[in-house]
Image (cartoon, grey):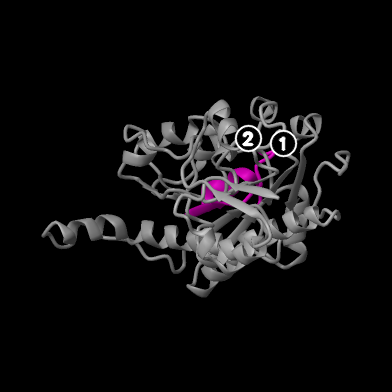
C-alpha cells in the first residue's frame, strides 16, 4: 500500500523500532503541516492509507472528496478532528485503537513537570541566570498543598500517584460515574463542583474532548479559584469555554500552565497565553516522547497491516467494507 504519514514535524518516526512494521509498504512522510484541504489533497493523491499524528490535521469532506484513492485512515485514540460521516460517505475506513495499553505516562509526567516548573518559577529563573542575573523571585513549595484532578481516568490516576509521592493532598471531581468510582476506590471527592475549584491550590484537567465536555470549564469555575492558584491543561483546549482562560488570566489573579491551544501550532506572539507572566505555555509536548511515539504508532502501523491483510482491526465505521 501507498502510505502517507502527516505532520511528523521532526521526522521522528523513521528512527523508531515500530517503523519497521511498514517495511512492506511504500511510505511517504510529510514533516510539515499543510492546513489547506485542497493543497493537502494534491500532496496525497496517490495515498491508499493516511497516518494521522494525533489531532494535528483535521479530516473533513473537503479533503476526502478530493482523494479518490484513499481507503484507510489509521490513528490512535479519540478522533474529534475526523468527520466520520464524511469518511463513510467517501468509503474511507477509519481505524483507531481507543483503549491503548495503560496510562499515557508521558502526559502524566508532563503534567507534573508543569506544576513543578510553575510553582518553582523554573523558566524565568533560567532566563534570569542566562542573562547574567541571579534569582528573579521566590517560588512556592508543593508539599501539603491540594491538587484537584478533574476527570477520573488513567492519566489523572498516574498524576495522583506522583503528587502523593511529593506530599500533596489530592481531591477529585468528575462525572457522576467518575466520582462514584473515585469514592469506591477510597479517594477524596470534593463536596461540590464549586468547592473543588475554590479549595484546590492546583487544578489539572484530564478529560476527553467530546460534545458533552466541550466548554465544560466556565468563567464561573475559574472565578471560583483562589488567588494565585494554578490551572493546568495537558488534555484539550476545547474543555475550556472560548476566551474564558484568557479573560481570567488578564486579571492577574490566577496562574496557568497550558500545553494545548485552540489553534495549533500557535505562533501568535500577541496571544496572552504565550505572553502573560502568569502563564507557562508549552507547544503540545505532553505526549511527545520517543517512547510514547513508539507505543502509539505500533498500534497505528498494526492497523495498516491488518487492513492490508484483509482483516481490519479497531474499526470505527464498520459499515465501510473492504
Residue 113 falls in image quadrant:
bottom left
Q: At 37% from the left edge and 56% from the top edge, which residue is drawn?
A: 118
Magenta span contains residue 211: yes
Vertical order, 85 against 21 (above or below): above
* Residue contact between numbered discs 1 and 2, judged by CB atoms under 8 Å: yes
Give the percent coordinates (x, y) of residue 167: 49, 72
Give the percent coordinates (x, y) of residue 45: 63, 35
Query: Circle 2 — which element?
Result: loop
Magenta span contains residue 95: no
Vertical order, 316 against 309 (above or below): above
Q: Foreground: 296 or 50?
A: 50
In the drawing, what numbered circle is on residue 45? 2
Q: If you read the primary sequence from the N terminus, does the residue marked by circle 1 or circle 2 appear first?
A: 2
Q: Which residues are magenta?
A: 191-213
Residue lying farthest bottom?
A: 165
Q: Foreground: 142 or 241?
A: 241
* CA neighbours of label 2 inside 10 A, class few (<14), some (14 to 19), many (20+): some
Q: At 78% from the left edge and 54% from the top edge, which residue is drawn?
A: 308
In the drawing, what numbered circle is on residue 69? 1
Which part of the image, by quadrant, shows the C terminus? Answer: top right
Residue 238 falls in image quadrant:
top right
Q: At 50% from the left edge and 67% from the top edge, which residue is drawn?
A: 168
* CA neighbours of label 1 inside 10 A, class few (<14), some (14 to 19), many (20+): some
Residue 57 falls in image quadrant:
top right
Residue lying farthest left?
A: 132
Give the percent coordinates (x, y) of residue 202: 48, 54
Query: Circle 1 — which element?
Result: loop
Q: Foreground: 141 or 240?
A: 240
Amino acid at each position: 500500500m501507498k502510505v502517507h504519514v502527516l505532520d511528523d514535524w521532526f521526522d521522528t518516526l523513521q528512527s523508531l523500532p515500530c517503523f519497521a512494521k511498514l517495511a512492506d509498504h511504500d511510505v511517504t512522510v510529510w514533516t510539515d503541516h499543510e492546513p489547506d484541504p485542497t493543497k493537502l489533497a494534491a500532496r496525497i493523491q496517490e495515498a491508499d492509507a493516511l497516518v494521522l499524528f494525533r489531532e494535528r490535521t483535521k479530516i473533513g469532506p473537503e479533503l476526502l472528496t478530493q482523494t479518490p484513492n484513499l481507503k484507510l485512515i489509521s490513528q490512535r485514540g479519540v478522533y474529534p478532528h475526523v468527520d466520520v460521516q464524511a469518511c463513510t460517505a467517501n468509503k474511507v475506513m477509519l481505524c483507531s485503537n481507543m483503549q491503548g495499553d495503560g496510562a499515557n505516562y508521558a502526559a502524566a509526567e508532563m503534567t507534573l513537570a508543569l506544576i513543578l516548573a510553575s510553582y518553582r518559577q523554573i523558566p524565568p529563573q533560567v532566563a534570569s541566570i542566562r542573562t547574567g542575573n541571579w534569582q528573579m523571585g521566590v517560588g512556592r513549595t508543593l508539599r501539603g498543598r491540594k491538587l484537584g484532578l478533574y476527570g477520573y481516568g488513567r492519566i489523572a490516576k498516574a498524576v495522583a500517584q506522583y503528587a502523593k509521592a511529593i506530599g500533596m493532598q489530592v481531591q477529585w471531581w468528575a462525572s457522576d460515574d467518575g466520582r462514584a468510582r473515585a469514592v469506591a476506590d477510597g479517594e477524596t471527592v470534593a463536596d461540590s463542583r464549586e468547592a473543588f475549584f475554590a479549595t484546590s491550590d492546583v487544578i489539572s484537567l484530564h478529560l476527553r474532548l467530546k460534545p458533552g465536555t466541550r466548554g465544560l470549564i466556565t468563567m464561573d469555575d475559574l472565578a471560583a479559584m483562589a488567588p494565585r492558584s494554578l490551572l493546568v491543561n495537558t488534555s484539550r483546549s476545547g474543555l475550556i469555554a472560548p476566551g474564558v482562560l484568557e479573560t481570567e488570566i488578564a486579571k492577574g489573579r490566577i496562574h496557568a500552565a497550558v500545553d494545548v491551544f485552540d489553534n495549533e501550532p500557535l505562533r501568535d506572539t500577541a496571544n496572552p497565553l504565550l505572553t502573560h507572566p502568569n502563564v507557562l505555555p508549552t507547544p503540545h509536548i505532553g505526549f511527545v516522547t520517543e517512547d510514547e511515539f513508539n507505543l502509539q504508532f505500533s498500534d497505528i502501523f498494526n492497523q495498516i497491516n491488518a487492513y492490508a491483510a484483509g482483516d481490519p482491526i479497531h474499526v470505527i465505521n464498520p459499515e465501510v467494507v473492504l
